[in-house]
Image: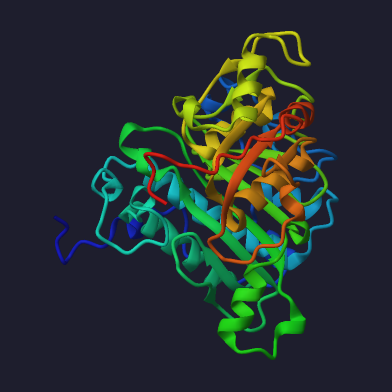
Amino acid sequence: MQSAATPPLYHLVSFRPKLQNLSSKSQLFALGTPFCRLRMNSVSGSGLRPLRAVGGSSSSSGGDDEFVTLIEYVGKEGIHVKDDLVVLLDHIQYACKRIAALVASPFNYSLGKQTGLASVGSDRDAPKPLDIVSNEIILSSLRKSGKVAVMASEENDEPTWIRDDGPYVVVTDPLDGSRNIDASIPTGTIFGIYKRLEELDDLPIEEKAMLNSLQSGSRLVAAAYVLYSSATILCITFGSGTQAFTLDHSTGDFVLTNPSIKIPPRGQIYSVNDARYFDWPEGLRQYIDTVRQGKGRYPKKYSARYICSLVADLHRTLLYGGVAMNPRDHLRLVYEANPLSFIVEQAGGRGSDGKHRILSLQPFKLHQRLPLFLGSLEDIEELESYGDIQQKVNPGYEV
């Protein structure tokens, strides 16, 4: 048990001094954030290649070992990200670094245990201390950024209003897959960023907080996930392609390792809990039977790969193609389906609920659940052609 004199674990997880409130890119770069010098074995051993700075834009004289960091990329690489968004991203990446250290800490064992805290979901998804700590880390960083009006989190019943003049709205799943943390299975953070709806400013706080959080995924200005695994990878889109950055633990920088992720138009992998095969509707069973026999539109047999961690299963799908799915009404539209579908679409894929494009759906509840199918464009189109693929009965599950 932690003594009263010992600060909470998440207070001990730190990378740098307390973040300042920065109002512009010029102030942020004035802090001297350099291109990082890559010294991370997990990058060189993963097939990812860090990208060097172009045009000699770094002020350091290291030569060949200068690489592009996340903040350098969004601030100077011509993708037209506004100053306020750059500052917000700096605070978000800092929060994710703290969560990465927390997940990897030998002291997180007790934080992964179930608690008696109230949950907006089923007992299987009841909050655990690790979820709560991750949520607090993100909320703290968003407050310090000065750029966020409201945060909506999977861990909270209602949105949290932060400040009236914040230009952005952030929706987040602070730690997806945390119930597997004891087994060291990969976990992840998911977030989406919207502009604050200024036309709602005169409404009561509770009402404008909710309406800002229930924006359609088609209005996203940025979305990202962070995968906590053998490497910590931040995959992000601003609506003009999908990029990946890998955390260099020796410098604390997210380094650009893939400037343009393109999901293959068709893969050879499906990812789903097929232990529930006999609970599936006929269309989904027929699709799986067909592709794993090599009798579908693609004349090769598909393989099954399933981690039971949404971010990890999606990350593999982005790289190798195929489809990652949960056919039940289980995944959250606001925190999971919308941000991840935006990322997948910007990589050339598709996000679907089995009948409709995810980003075309209008959320009507904060914790609204739905089936989710993400992956290669041709695979998703073939899957949807079977019609009856949404699982509407859930024997053996709690609602």
- Describe the colour scheme in one phrase: rainbow
The vertical placement of 238 against 314, above or below, is below
Q: Quick one: 97 or 123, which is closer to the camera?
A: 123
The vertical placement of 40 against 102, above or below, is above
Residue 397, quarter of picture: top left
Q: Quick one: 255 or 233, which is closer to the camera?
A: 233
Residue that sits furthest to the front in the current view: 282
Residue 26 visible to an observer of this rendering = no
The vertical placement of 296 against 368, above or below, is above
- The residue located at (20%, 61%) in the rendering is 6
Q: In this view, does 181 lie to the left or right of 302?
A: left
- The residue located at (62%, 42%) in the rendering is 372
Q: Is residue 146 left or right of residue 306?
A: right
The vertical placement of 60 against 381, above or below, is below
Residue 249 visible to an observer of this rendering = yes
- Residue 235 position, x and y percent, is 65, 42
Q: Quick one: 344 or 221, which is closer to the camera?
A: 344
- The residue located at (55%, 38%) in the rendering is 326
- Residue 139 position, x and y percent, is 49, 66
Residue 246, quarter of picture: top right
- Residue 394 position, x and y percent, is 45, 42
For the image, the number of numbered tags is 0
- Residue 373 position, x and y percent, is 65, 38
- The residue located at (78%, 31%) in the rendering is 381
Q: In this view, does 392 lie to the left or right of 386?
A: left
Residue 65, quarter of picture: top right
Q: Which quadrant: the N terminus? A: bottom left
